[in-house]
Image (cartoon, coloured by chain):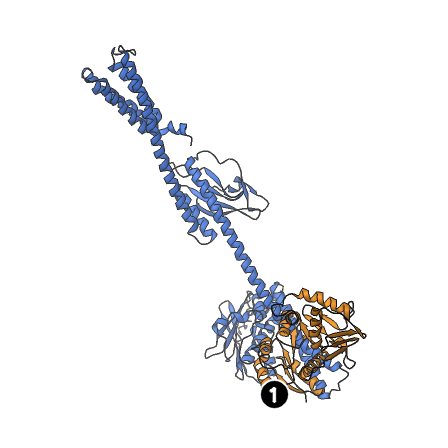
Chain colours: A orange, B blue
Amino acid sequence: MTRVLVVDDEPPIVRAVAANLRVRGFEVLTASTGEAALAAVETHQPDCVVLDLGLPGIDGLEVLRRLRTWTQVPVVVLTAVDSERDKVTALDLGADDYVTKPFGVAELMARIRVALRHARAAGADRPRVITAADVTIDLDAKLVTRDGTAVRLTPTEYRLLETLATNAGRLCTHRFLLERVWGPGYGDESQYLRVYMANLRKKLDDPAAPQLLLTEPGMGYRFVVPEPDTAPTEA
Amino acid sequence: MDVPRRLAVGGPRAALGYAVAVAGTALITAPLLAIRGNVNKTTVVLAYLLVVTAAAAAGGLGPGITAAALGFLAFDLLFLQPYHHIIVDDPQDYLSLAVYLLVAVVVSLLVATSERRRAQAERRERETRMLFDLSTSLVAHGSLEDTLRGVVRTVRSLFDLAGCAIVLPSGDGLRLAAVDGEVPGDLDDRFVGVRDGQASIQLRGPAGADLEPGGALTVPMRSGASVVGALVVVAGGPDSSGFGEAERRVLATFANQAALAVERGQQEEQRNRALALQETDRLRTALLNSVSHDLRTPLASIKASASSLLDREVRWSDAERDEFLVTINTEVDRLTRLVHNLLDMSRIEAGALDPHLVESSVAEVVGPVVRRARAASRQRVDVDVPDELAPVLVDPVRLDQVLTNLLDNARGYAGTGPVEVVARQAGDTVELRVVDHGPGIPVPERERVFGQFYRLKGGGRRPEGTGMGLAICRGIVQAHGGTLRVETTPGGGATFVLSLPVSPRPAPAPDHEVARP
């Protein structure tokens, strides 16, 4: 059974989230402090962690920082509407996704499913060919086609697309993308990203209404593979 | 001061010089005349030159020239043949006279000049010393007001003044920033007024001539192009040193230095104001964060529960459904309480609480509060409210709110122990004590518990309150003209002391029993 750890200091929220996870067939662990959360991850090895950032004692960001020193367990953080910076920090620290409070339970469930799927995909042999709508990316041949026709990409455009596609479904922050594509030392030059994302959209997507390459304002970008079984609008 | 005027000094020094010239000439002439036959002309000339030197040294150029003239006449009339005539027999004597006159004038000039230089040096030294004393008064003090007070004191004592003041622009008018001694009451008339709030004032009329005792002089305090204020000096008695050109120059220089000090002080004040604003901003941000967290948390619980119930994919059991509904219900109550508190808080801060004051007995207000507390839990609540307490002027609804809050707090922190409500008369006030024997409040936290969004740390107890309760209580009590403070319960625990003013209206006199016949 898939095991999810829910960390929040508000009992009503923990109860609601736990009930929803249980009814969907997950095994649920709960913790109300950062210390308890760290201990629970170590002892019970959950498959996913739902982590509130505003914890008393060790706060959520610190929990995340400590978790990432030894485990890649997917983490979905819960944040307040107005703490944009915390969101970006959490994602930079290696959180897989975030949900803003107050949240609808369905949205949180969808984010947890995506995080779990991504973690499983990362653990298994990665597919070497990624298909999203009419776009196909062959990672071995470094070949991108749209509707069966090859698309010409510059080396930087290709590296950016590759990074996003191999993290499909996940929100990639500006810093993450810049460091992966341009190299360490880059991190604040988000204007580079804007230019290259615009080019990629022109070649692979609908620049007016993007379907594959979504912008998360102020935070980063997300490569979405539309799937028939989950609603793509959630991502 | 110009050189020619200075060389021809007036006043007591010149008089002394002329006296020396006349008396010296006479004194020298008498013995020389006695031995006229045996004395040679050179001796006579040298003797008169001595008088010229003395007169010039004593009184400057004028007396020197006078002595030279007198000496010339005496020499010519009394010591050159023929006696008592301007003309002389020996042509060589004309030469002697001419040389004498030339030397006498040169000596007078030299002596007078050197005397003037000496006087100048002395005056400069005095000015320097004064400026030094004044400058010291500028740096030695702390706040701007202190500095200015030091300045007027120093100026007054240095110039031996009847009074000294500093006038600064303030708002649309002027204010007397510092005064020492007596200053005229018509200061306002001396200034044209403030120019468009630029911290600049204009002086009216010229800065007059030498001051009569009791006359006032305004010296502008300039910094760059603007006048930041004015130094007003009032001359002292007839013995005071007066206001010569030199003193005036020192005053002007000093007024400008004081202007710099004023500007420095004003900048400091501005900086302090900016710092205070920053601190207020920081507090406001902390408050906003706290409020938004407190508002968002119940909203998040309600949203999570409601969206769960609305989810058509899931079939909830009755128990689960109930739990979601209970959560929604509880959290809506919490939100309501918070909104109420926020409204109360903003009313208190806006001074719009406006309690509806009624003369009430303390026992009447305490009764229902305690009854509710006893009904809510089995915790013991002891009450000690004597009947003979004076009535107080309160809004019973608001006082009920305060007492309920204090009692709830006390019960929360008392654990299973009892809490007490004690009322006592204390002079013009009635003191109501809500006592618990819980962990108490550490002394450094005593005032902070009344701050907004304060919650006692530790205790492992999840704070249920809004963190505004005590701030609101104090706000309400203060709106009643009372006070609320916290003390240590003897033996441990916290005691909240609510002090309310006794109603000023006398209680109705008790009915007198009619004496039975």
* Image x and y of residue B114, in percent: 34, 31
Amino acid under disc 1? His
Q: In the displayed structure, does residue B381 sit left or right of residue B297? A: left
Q: In the displayed structure, does residue A150 sit left or right of residue A77? A: right
Residue B1 lies in quadrant: top left
Residue B232 in sight here: yes
Residue B9 in sight here: no
* Image x and y of residue A230, in percent: 76, 80
Q: Check disc 1 and report the residue beneath it.
A: A44
Q: In the displayed structure, does residue B249 sit left or right of residue B16? A: right
Letter of the chain that mark 1 sits on in the rendering = A
Residue farthest bottom in this picture: A1
User: Element type at marker 1?
Assistant: helix
Residue B84 lies in quadrant: top left
In this view of the protein, which residue sits in the foreground, A6 or B5? A6
* Image x and y of residue B13, in percent: 34, 29
In this view of the protein, which residue sits in the foreground, B170 or A152? A152
Count residues near mark 1 (Cα–Cα under 10 Å), then give few for <14, some for 14-19, many for 20+: few
Instruction: Give the total number of marks visible in the rendering.
Output: 1
- Residue at horizontal 79%, vertical 76%? A133
| In the rendered image, the vertical position of residue B20 relative to residue B230, given as above or below | above
* Image x and y of residue B392, in percent: 56, 69
Q: In the displayed structure, does residue B213 sit left or right of residue A49? A: left
- Residue at horizontal 41%, vertical 37%? B246
| In the rendered image, the vertical position of residue B109 relative to residue B482, given as above or below | above
